[in-house]
Image (spheres, rainbow, N blue to C red):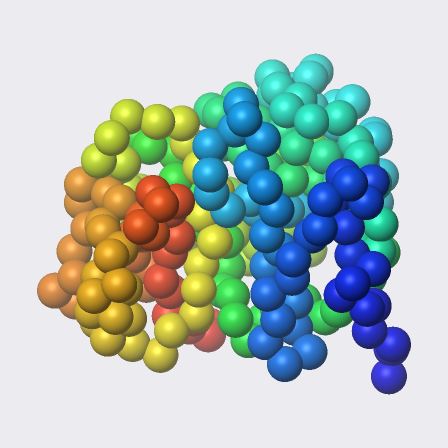
Amino acid sequence: MKSKPQIENLAWGGGEKEFVLALSGDEAGAGFAETPQDQEDGWITYVEVADVDAAVERTNSLGGIIVREPFEVPGVGRNALVRDPLGALLGLSLSKHSFPVPRRQFGTEVYVGNGDKFPEAFYAELFEWQVSPKRDMECIAVLGPWGDPVALQHAATWRIGSNAAWVPSIKVASISDACFAAESMGARSASVDSNKTGEARSLIFCDPDGAPFALGVERTNTF
């Protein structure tokens, strides 16, 4: 068994500020850090890459924007922040910790283009991702280099004008029960086309601070 990093050794921004991990058993599901002044509050989806610096260098040539140049998070790894051509914020990471991928807590990441199409060329060149020709209700699978689903493109449109976004998907047993619980704690629907009458694959909400998140039911043999 791999040894776990001590939480007190994990730091944000070269050790200047604490980086708080949210744990569920042996899974590190999320990290919490102070939001920079020029960035909105919210969740950041990270993609694991072999070389963060090389991926950042390619981002500019592919129409993306560098939000934060590569930086070290002691005990966590090397990260960077970029935006894709539609403005969706994305983290690039080369992990240096031993926590397993949080598959019990989170489902497939969701991409909302907010009325625009998924910038397929950008992700194809950067990560070798492709959009699946098959459709599943309101979602389209985004496939990785080996044909496995790595994300979902969602057809939702935000209630308020904003960039496209990557949205974390929290695994739930029942969409309807989770919706009720989320709304009772101050969450609200994030999209104009939410439909809670059926057991949809994924529904998108905003938490009380306005950060979008998805509630998803993972299904097998879909794509």
Residue at horizontal 41 percent and vertical 32 percent from the top: 164
Q: Residue 116: horizontal and vertical position, in percent?
A: 36, 27
Q: Which of 33 and 213 is in front in this view?
A: 33
Q: Quadrant of residue 156?
A: top left
Residue at horizontal 69 percent and vertical 78 percent from the top: 26
Q: Nearer the viewer, residue 1 or 42?
A: 42
Residue at horizontal 23 percent and vertical 51 percent from the top: 188
Q: Residue 149: horizontal and vertical position, in percent?
A: 55, 57
Residue 167 falls left or right of residue 123? left
Vertical order, 74 against 182 (above or below)? above
Vertical order, 45 against 115 (above or below)? below
User: Number of callouts in the render?
Assistant: 0
Residue at horizontal 39 percent and vertical 40 percent from the top: 112
Q: Residue 87: horizontal and vertical position, in percent?
A: 49, 25
User: Can residue 200 be seen?
Assistant: no
Vertical order, 153 against 163 (above or below)? below
